Image: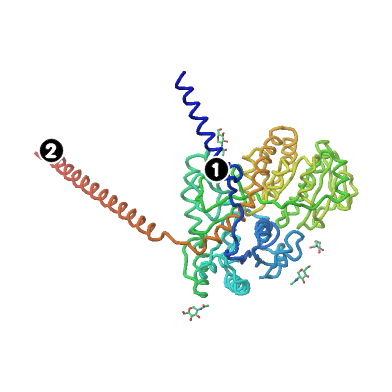
Amino acid sequence: MCSKLWYFVIFLFINTNIVTKADALGKNNGFIQRELDLDRSDTPKNILVGSVIGGGSHLNPMLEVCKILVDRGYKVKLAAPGNFTATSPLYHSIPQFIIEEPSDTYASPELRKIFFDKYDFKSLANEQMTFNERYLEYFNKYFQAYKETKADLFFCDYDGNDACFDLAWKLKKPAVGFASNTEFFTAPPPFRSDPMVGCRVNMENESFYNRFICAIIQPLRLDWHFRKNLNYLNARRAEVNVSKHYDIRGRIVNNLFLVDSFFGFEVPSAWPPIHQEIGPILPDIYPDLSSELDLFLSDHPRTMYIALGSYVYTTPENYAILLQSALELINNNILDGVIWATVRFNESELPSSFTLSTGDVIPTSKLLNNLYPHIYVTKYAPQFAILSHENTKVFISHGGVSSSHESMYSATPMLILPIAFDQPGNAEKLVLSGMALELSKLDLKIDDIISKVIKLMNEKSFKMNAERMQVLLKFNSKRKYRGADLIEIVMNLAKRDGNYLDVFGVAIIIGLALISSLLYSFYKIIMFTFKKLSLRNRNSQEGSSKPKNE
Ligand SMILES: *[C@@H]1O[C@H](CO)[C@@H](O)[C@H](O)[C@H]1NC(C)=O
Ligand SMILES: *[C@@H]1O[C@H](CO)[C@@H](O)[C@H](O)[C@H]1NC(C)=O
Ligand SMILES: *[C@@H]1O[C@H](CO)[C@@H](O)[C@H](O)[C@H]1NC(C)=O
Ligand SMILES: *[C@@H]1O[C@H](CO)[C@@H](O)[C@H](O)[C@H]1NC(C)=O
């Protein structure tokens, strides 16, 4: 009792003592303000952004990060195909070097083949080869852009963009990579794979046979299949005095990579710290509904939205199946409205009329001219505004990254018809999240679409899981500022980089020495046992044969 009182007195004494000292100092009760702003006067300023693919879905997220850097006083220039930034409402403040005419090749036979046939890693290799064939052209264009901008840092889109990473490496400038998922620029842990190699994004529940094939055999086949591309690329590198590099993923192991994705969507696994998730990256503003669309949506409380993104398309047969299913769903009063953004599809390839299961015949021209009251057809649509409308209940999508992000952000359950590239993998991830179901472009069936739409509309779990994803999206979509911070960090540290080649070199040598000595002892033991056994065998043979001979 007494000692407690004593402590209390001491406590009081100490506290009053602190307060009196602080008062004596007279500064904010003894606290000083932590300086929040960075002194940027000494930081290099010029950033060159490089992409050989261009187009909205690739460039928008990168430029979203760049806009933040521009606000912080950096000078950003883009090198990409087309006249993208000048014509874009959101990014026209970023000047651009046009490295190529806008690619109008979306109807080319090669792309049609990719979009219409089975998509696998061989298609990916062919696609990569078309970029490798233009390596020198890109390298020189980037070098020209570098000389004009005096870039201090390269911000390189990952896809098909070896020239960007190689040039930065050759000039000894830092390069920051950008990708929308981790599948291709990092060796995935064995339980992760991709439909592109005939496997699943998450292998945890697969049979031993499938896990063996997907973890061991397919990666070897992939390396083998890409070796031709690699040899070709190395020959091109030699022409511009860039030394050879034997990693099919490119010259990227020491680069900071920003990934437009997030935990909860990606199959969970540990990544090295130079791979930083900053996604989903979304702009702050979106085009609004036209008054016509606004009216349509208000009048149709159970609307389905169909759009396959700005780049891919499927066969006329598949479009007819989609449209036929939409009409049946409306006829059965499951839906009362459908909005279809046709984008890359040429509507004149549709059959001239649709016959419903009830026998009704609807001429296609009536649909395309928006004379059928339940269907609204348009070339382009303000997608995010449509998805954000409470009357949009289901989204039939190709599963591209930005469409998926927008659907999750607006908590809209999805029916996914993946066409190519990362879309089959995204589709599986969305199905695993419980907010989506998937269709097959090679086996599209009206009954299947109808039953899946009914499931998505009636089973509460899809909407609930979509709302769960929405929470993740809302929190994580603030991370584009983190992306800009990380690029600034690299700009500040570029002057002081070192490397650990010496340390890792020695570690590898020690590892190799250990492995070879182990192998040697193993060999010795086997030889020893073998000798012993054969000696004993001979002895016992001699022993057993002797009596017979006698
Ligand atoms: C790019 O677009 C802008 C705005 O539409 C136009 O003024 C400019 O001439 C275009 N540049 C090229 C090279 O097409
Ligand atoms: C694997 O199975 C478990 C148990 O049924 C389930 O909880 C989990 O979601 C499954 N994982 C995948 C990737 O399907
Ligand atoms: C590559 O190096 C060689 C020899 O050093 C030189 O002659 C040649 O001009 C260089 N080529 C380029 C494109 O830099
Ligand atoms: C669409 O297809 C029709 C007929 O096949 C053709 O005449 C027309 O030029 C095509 N339109 C476009 C924009 O490709």
Residue 62 at x, y = what percent? Answer: 65, 58
The disc labelled 1 sits on which kind of residue?
Answer: Pro
* Left or right of residue 421, residue 513 in this image: left
Residue 491, given in percent of the width and then of the height, sits at: 56, 61
* Residue farthest toward the top in the current orientation of the protein: 1
Please determine whether, in this image, residue 70 is positioned above or below residue 210.
below
Q: How is the rendered protein coloured? A: rainbow
What residue did someone put label 1 on? 268
How dense is the environment of label 2, judged by Cα within 10 Å: few (below 14), some, or many (20 and up)? few
Does residue 521 sit above or below 233 in this rendering?
above
Label annotation for residue 420: none
What residue would you read off at disc 2?
548
- The number of callouts visible is 2
Which of these two is toward me, 44 or 441? Answer: 44
Q: Is residue 453 above or below residue 220?
A: above
Secondary element type, mark 2: helix
The C terminus: image quadrant: top left
Q: Position of residue 221 (x, y in %)?
A: 49, 55
Quarter of the figure with residue 258 = bottom right
Q: In the displayed structure, does residue 224 sit left or right of residue 468?
A: left
Alpha carbon distance from label 1 to label 2: 69 Å
The residue at 57%/70% (across/down) is 135
- At x 52%, y 39%, the residue is 204
